[in-house]
Image (cartoon, rainbow, N blue to C red):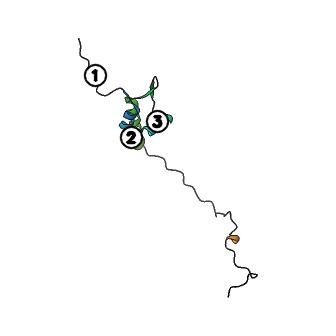
Amino acid sequence: MTDTKVNAEPLLLTASEAARRLGIGRTTLYELVKAGKIEEVHIGRCARFHRDEVDRFAASLASDRAQPKPSPPIRKRSGRRRTAANQGELFALPSDDAPEAS
């Protein structure tokens, strides 16, 4: 008989284990699955996450941080802004027809 070494860490992780490994919540993990960033494995009705897939995603985050992100384009203001309301109505002065308070 030969002794086989069993890896202490499982190959497939539950959603809770995978989320804990990434330091996120289960809901966020499932949002990443829906966005196609992490792939899940189904065994029957159970969803599991391959340990290497979770590690790959974590490594991709580190490499994304290392690359500088392009700065957003600078938007120039175009001329004068126009108001939708008639400002004359907003700041109406009392008319000459109105009686003055004494």
Q: Please name the residue that numbered disc 2 is placed on.
A: 62
Residue sitting nearer the eye, 38 or 100: 100
CA distance separating discs 2 and 3: 20 Å
In the orientation shown, which residue stands out farthest toward the top?
1
Q: Where does residue 33 sit, x and y in percent of width and height?
A: 47, 34
Viewer-nearest of discs 2 and 1: 1
Q: Where does residue 15 sit, x and y in percent of width and height?
A: 41, 33
Dot 3, how many residues are within 10 Å of its Cα: few (below 14), some (14-19), or many (20+)? some
Horizontal relation, residue 89 to residue 60: left or right: right
Residue sitting nearer the eye, 48 or 74: 48
Dot 1, how many residues are within 10 Å of its Cα: few (below 14), some (14-19), or many (20+)? few
**N-term mark: 2 or 3:** 3
The amino acid on which the numbered mark 2 sits, given as a three-letter code, is: Ala
Q: Please name the residue that numbered disc 1 is placed on.
A: 6
Q: Where does residue 42 sit, x and y in percent of width and height?
A: 45, 25
Q: Please name the residue that numbered disc 3 is placed on.
A: 30
Kindly state the secondary structure of the residue where label 3 is placed: helix
Which of the 4 image quarters holds residue 78? bottom right
Question: Which part of the image, by quadrant, shows the N terminus?
Answer: top left
CA distance separating discs 3 and 1: 29 Å
- Residue in the image at 24% along x and 13% along y: 2
